[in-house]
Image (cartoon, rainbow, N blue to C red):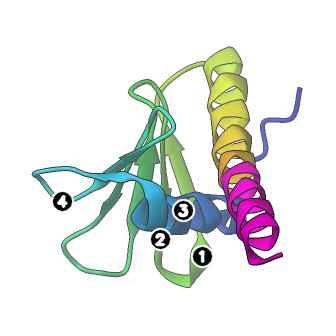
Amino acid sequence: METNVTSELLLRVYQRAINHGERLPENGYRFYDLTVTVEPDGYSIGVSDGVVTARVLFHNKVAITGGTSRSLAVFRKKLEAATNQDRTTSNSASSTSTSNAR
């Protein structure tokens, strides 16, 4: 099971959360069992599932805290599912639009 978490993956999840997630009263969004936030400095973002937290820092460095190797693998699966979730939703929406246009 892959446990590598890249800044690219975290940024994709972050963007999907902004576009499709639920805005939280505090500084963040909730999307696909993940919470994403922007640090007050505006340069860092965080993505957390409540066990593992990954932050994208300045120059796309990734810092991961919490959990075990198993919880990191579960976190990685949630990140992948969140990116696939949006593709599925977008594909369904565009096929519906195409069907209606005919």
The numbered mark, 1 or 3, whose residue comes first in the sequence reads: 3
Q: Which type of secondary structure does the marked residue at label 1 adopt?
A: helix
Please report whichever mark, 1 or 4, sits nearer to the chain's N-terminal start. 4
Q: Residues in magenta?
A: 87-102
Say which element carries label 2. loop
The residues tagged by marks 2 and 3 sit, at their Cα atoms, a distance apart of: 19 Å
Q: Of the residues shown, which amino acid type is indicated by label 4?
A: Asn
Cα distance between the residues tagged 2 and 4: 17 Å
Image x and y of residue 40, in percent: 18, 72
Question: Which badge, 2 or 4, is on the more N-terminal residue?
Answer: 4
In the image, residue 26 lies at what x, y percent? Answer: 12, 53
Where is 37 relative to 41, above or below? above
Residue 97, given in percent of the width and then of the height, sits at 71, 70
Q: Residues within 10 Å of mark 2 (few under 14, many from 20)?
A: some
Quadrant of the rendering where the C terminus is positioned = bottom right
For the residues labelled 1 and 4, say whether their Cβ atoms are less than 8 Å apart: no
Label 1, label 4: how far apart the Cα atoms are: 21 Å
Residue 16 is marked as: 3
Q: Provide the residue designation for mark 2.
A: 57
> For residue 94: magenta?
yes
Report the Cα–Cα distance between label 2 and label 1: 5 Å
For discs 1 and 4, the disc positioned in front in the rendered view: 4
Q: Inspect the magenta stretch and tell me whether residue 55 lies in it.
A: no
For label 1, the residue is 60
